[in-house]
Amino acid sequence: MPRDLILGTAGHIDHGKTSLVKALTGIDCDRLPEEKARGITIDIGFATLDLGDYRLGIVDVPGHERFIKNMLAGATGIDLVVLVIATDDSVMPQTREHLEILRLLGLRHGLIALTKCDLVDDTTREVVELEIRDLVQGTFLETAPIVPTSAYSGKGIPELKAAIVEICRTIEEKTGAEWFRMAIDRSFIVQGHGTIVTGSVTSGSVKVGDELDWQPRGERVRVRSLQNHDQAVEEVHRGMRAALNLAGIRHEDVIRGQEVATPGCLVPSRTVTVRLHCLKDARKPIKHRASVRFHIGTSEIMGTVSLLDCDSIPPGGWGLAQLFLEEPATATWGQPFVVRGPSATYTLGGGQVLQPVAKKIRRRHLEMLERVEKLWTGSAEERALTVAWFSGFSGFTAADLVRGANIPPDQVEELIARLAATQRGALVHIALSPAKKLLLHADMVQELNERILTVLGRMHEEFPLMTTHDRQRVQSQLDYVGDDALVQAAVERLIKQKQIVGDLRRIARADFKPRLSANLRKLKDKVVEVYREARFQPPEPASFAPQAGGNAANLKDLFEVCIAEGFLVRIAPDLYLHGEVEAEMRRIVTERLQNGPGLTVAEIRDMLGTTRKYAVPLCEYLDAAGVTKREGDLRVLAAAPTTEDAKQPSE
């Protein structure tokens, strides 16, 4: 079975790239009428070359400076390149620019084809070869073979094929599981079949009938059929040129730059964190807040550079940056990209993606920058932990580690298990419900714990006599965390760890000791008992001042403690009922109103055995609590059962 690889061309306009591909394959890659008429390549073209052990999909790119964006789209996913240089022209501007772009895209394999050799003498050819060696010094083509050719006469074509085979033998074959990914470079309609999208498969494989994510639209699509070099196949994989017939999508909605990938593989983002390089021969440094054209995959997106560790990157320099994009991009860790000037007339630089889905990072924030740096210099485990840390309280998934830390899909679960294995593991599973768990970095768990304890500590300082606090009130002060279930789960963990004491209603720090003296405790017990016995004719708080003696100034706080602990309920200012008495009042009034007409204040007064002094505020409290509502001089149930409700059988 031949190995599939993708070969790309590169070089200056009119140096014979398309003619060379035709001499190699017999296929004319210029398919557009305008290309035929003008005699230049405008868009990327495609061909296939069978070399025995290797089956090459060829991507022929335009050489004109106006079509660099098309060249960049075509260079996505190539395994090796033929840099084409015409002997009668030698090294030209786009020769240099294409070579720089190939370096930025991380290409490591290729060779040089010297075209139009029949137009010059041997001396001229030798001089051109010296100029080429000077050009490629220090690049991945430094030791690459230079093969003299002539597409017109056929000279050197067999030697070029042989040299390509030798280069193919040096390309490492990727092993292990990969998710399928293909950036779309072309789409069209085939009558009776629908929309076809084409591209170079950069990782993984896909079969007929599989479902894929269509990004950045975020839609799920099904593969109806597949082709490789105009031949129907059941599967395509990395290294192939592929045409996918996708069910249920409109050709008008497909644009170059979109991708199809394994579900969950890619997440679109308008913010990416990168390590950014400014070309050695760049016209000027890359400055903070510079506008750029961001080229990644087959897409071109306008964006703004935010330099994180400097104010400008000089020619030849590197820096950490974030790119804020006008449209969402899809990327993975380590993916190469190129940035060009906003006018699209020159290349500024490029680099690698560190965070394909990022949040804004504050400039010159030392801790953040140290962690971002680990995404490039750290081990697989360190990268995974960095992704987990940046995920914050939102947590992360296995897919986030594959996408953001370059962990192979078949190894990610084992890595998570290893990092979460010990009691003090770097990753922590938080159970939000019996069926749902959240994965967090241990630092995030610790930070959440500290925030909960800090909130409780602040409340203990504010109410030093209060032994416990309402759990919902505590949790409401942490709503910025974003997930109330996470805060609840964290509180439960702290209760199990005995850092918090309490139940589903009220909690307190385990190390908190209420500053309630023995006399105040006795007074509190006395207050609670008096209100229980007083029922619906409760005393005024000030009446306890003589019994409080020197603690009279603490009476207000003491009543707040009684309310917080559920012993008393505030009805109105300076009017309280015992908690059990308040519940009894609700029950008595509700039962009476369910079994009869509305009640006047006087009737409620007599029913509760109280006086008008208390009956009026008690009725107003019941209205405010949603138990009753006023209709003229009567009180009726606030939520009386409807006719339909009355027909429902009782359980």
Image (tube, grey):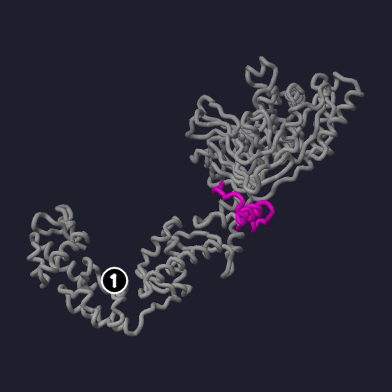
Q: Main secondary structure of the magenta part?
A: helix
Q: In this figure, which residue is indicated by the disc labeled 1? A: 563
Q: Quadrant of residue 569?
A: bottom left
Q: Is residue 355 left or right of residue 581?
A: right
Instruction: Assess whether residue 532 is covered by the magenta stretch.
Output: no
Residue beneath the point at 83% across and 19% down: 153
In terms of secondary structure, where does tag 1 sit? helix
Residue 122: percent from left, percent from top: 91, 23
Give the camera-side residue of 195 and 638. Answer: 638
- Tell me how many marks there are: 1
* 346 over 119 or under it: above or below: below
Q: Quadrant of residue 565?
A: bottom left
Instruction: Assess whether residue 374 is covered by the magenta stretch.
Output: yes
* 488 over 251 or under it: above or below: below
Q: Is residue 399 left or right of residue 43?
A: left
* Type of amino acid at the residue the image marks with label 1: Ile
Residue 262: percent from left, percent from top: 56, 44
Residue beneath the point at 8% across and 57% down: 633
Residue 12: percent from left, percent from top: 74, 26
Q: Check disc 1: other Cα within 10 Å, few if <14, some if 14-19, many if 20+.
A: some
Give the camera-side residue of 463 and 35. Answer: 463
Quarter of the C terminus within the rendering:
bottom left
Quarter of the N terminus within the rendering:
top right
Instruction: Please identify the residue farthest to the right as the structure is shown.
Output: 123
Q: Which residues are magenta?
A: 357-385
Residue 601: percent from left, percent from top: 9, 63
Residue beneath the point at 72% across and 45% down: 173
- Residue 1: tell me if it is visible: no
* 452 over 283 or under it: above or below: below
